[in-house]
Image: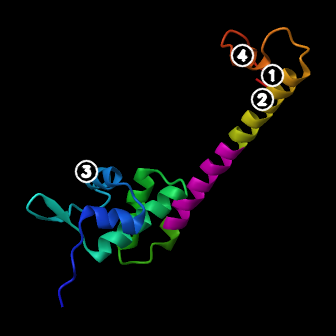
Amino acid sequence: MAEKAMPIGELSRRTGCNIETIRYYERIGLIPAPQRRGRYRSYRADDVGRLGFVRRARALGFTLEEVRALLGLAAGGQDPCAEVRSLAASHLKDVRARIADLRRMERVLADSVRACDSGQDPGCPLIEALDADRPTKGC
């Protein structure tokens, strides 16, 4: 029995992925270019699965190149677990560094808001903290 093809709008609805994002992923090769019926793209069920994989990897913060590598490893047929683990460990290190940066930003913003609330500073503490000519606390 032939698999029923679906238009891009249906693929978008099933995956929650914006149509322009789907087209972009096609252009950069993350998802294969679909067959066409005239001017219209025609997708299959495995396109839904692949796009879902891409979206979940992106939601975890993997870059497009990391997603490309994961897709390649998943399609490789051999046991890719060690390579996937290495990629995930590297990504985890980056995520932890971003979390540390966010915590530093939170402290600076919280200090600025507290200084604004106190009303003791004649200027705006947040503007002063953002002023490029002055060093900020903690640097």
Magenta region, residue range: 84-99
Q: Is residue 93 magenta?
A: yes
**C-alpha distance separating marks 1 and 3:** 45 Å
| Of the image marks 4 and 3, the number of the one nearer the N terminus | 3
Indicate the amino acid at tag 2: Val
Residue 100 occupies which quadrant of the picture? top right
Residue mark closest to the camera, 1 vs 3 = 3
**C-alpha distance separating marks 1 and 2:** 8 Å
Q: Which mark is residue 27?
A: 3
Label 1: how many Cα within 10 Å (few below 14, some 14–19, many 20+): few
Q: Secondary structure at mark 2?
A: helix
Q: Which residue is mark 2?
A: 108
Of 45 and 132, nearer the camera is 45
In percent of width and height, residue 59 lies at 52, 57
In the rendered structure, the answer to whether residue 9 lies left or right of residue 39 reads right
Task: Please report contact status of discs 4 and 3: CB closer than 8 Å, yes or no.
Answer: no
The correct choice, above or below, for 109 with respect to 80 in the image is above
Label 3: how many Cα within 10 Å (few below 14, some 14–19, many 20+): few
| Of the image marks 1 and 3, the number of the one nearer the N terminus | 3
**Which residue lies at the image location 66% right of the left edge and 44% below the top edge?**
97
The correct choice, above or below, for 103 with respect to 37 in the image is above
Give the main secondary structure of the magenta stretch.
helix
Q: Which residue is mark 1?
A: 137
Q: Which residue is mark 4?
A: 127
| Of the image marks 1 and 2, the number of the one nearer the N terminus | 2
Indicate the amino acid at tag 3: Arg
Question: Does residue 70 appear in the picture of this structure?
Answer: no
Q: Residue furthest left?
A: 38
